[in-house]
Image (cartoon, rainbow, N blue to C red):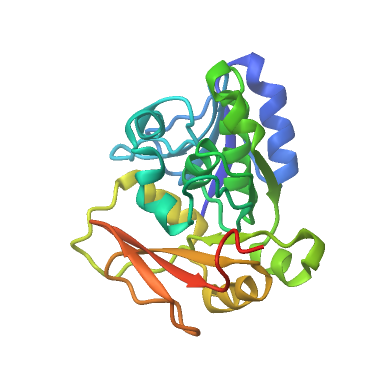
Amino acid sequence: MSLAVGWCVEADRAQAEQLAERLQLPVVAQPDLSCSENWQQILLVTDNGLSLCATGRKRAGPVRADFVGGAVAHRRQFGGGTGQLIAKACGIKGGIRPRILDATAGLGRDAFVLASLGCQVHLLERSPVVHALLASGLEQAESVVELADTLARMTLEQADGRAWLEQCTPECAPDLVYLDPMFPHTDKKAQVKKEMLAFRDLVGYDSDDRELLAAALQVARYRVVVKRARKAPAIEGMAPTYTVEGKSSRYDIYALKALGSD
């Protein structure tokens, strides 16, 4: 994937150059997003945060980690609280709020929902580019007072989820490990936004999902929850204890011990 860091106004130049150096990417001043000859995607630095922008005349819209507006804001206000499928899958009810490790954080949307419901969530993201997008989104959200409590329950680390789990000691073991690994999509009829297709082109898929699940099962104190497309096969290995199914996705639950049992 041909990728560069870009900036459009002088005030953002220093930040863009620092990010490009950290990610070992070229930096481009005032990139022309309508032209795809030089770069397929631009990681664009603006005063509104970081966005991943495709290039070309028929380019998709930008990809951002947005916790302030859009779908995340709507879900926060009207998502249904502990009645949501993800809350049921993670055993959130009454006074039970497990400490969660999101080992495949991505753009952080599910982790944000879990934190908004009162869980402490530690986010791991192994892609340096996606980590940068996520960190930028969390930083932008800090300006919204009403999100302060939720953000205080979220911590972000750039790390490979599988390696983190394999090195985890009993003292740092989470109550629950949450996994949402990228996997190849073979259903051509699936309605996937063009923005997310561009995102997948950059990130690829998690070919080690079987090993990731095995490591999670060794570490989690109470359960492992895996998010999958509704018709996708379960990850190879141990069979889920049960599933919680929605219209387009489902959660495979691997119950190790009852939440709140000790």
Give the residue drawn at x 46%, y 65%.
226
Say whether residue 170 is visible.
yes
Left or right of 63 in this view: 244: left
The answer to which of 60 and 98 lies nearer the viewer is 98
Q: Please state the horizontal and vertical placement of residue 141, each as a whole percent of the image.
A: 56, 25
Give the residue drawn at x 40%, y 36%.
35
Q: Residue 248: which quarter of the image?
A: bottom left
Tally the numbered discs: 0
Q: Please state the horizontal and vertical placement of residue 67, each as a whole percent of the image.
A: 49, 31
Outermost residue toward the bottom?
Answer: 237
Say whether residue 28 is visible.
no
Q: Relative to 188, does residue 121 appear above or below in the rendering?
A: above
Q: Relative to 139, does residue 52 appear above or below in the rendering?
A: below
Q: Residue 258: which quarter of the image?
A: bottom right
Q: Relative to 97, does residue 204 appear above or below in the rendering?
A: below
The answer to which of 62 and 208 lies nearer the viewer is 208
Q: Please state the horizontal and vertical placement of residue 144, each as a whole percent of the image.
A: 55, 18
Give the residue drawn at x 35%, y 36%.
61
Quadrant containing the C terminus in the rendered view: bottom right
Q: Please state the horizontal and vertical placement of residue 136, each as a whole percent of the image.
A: 60, 32
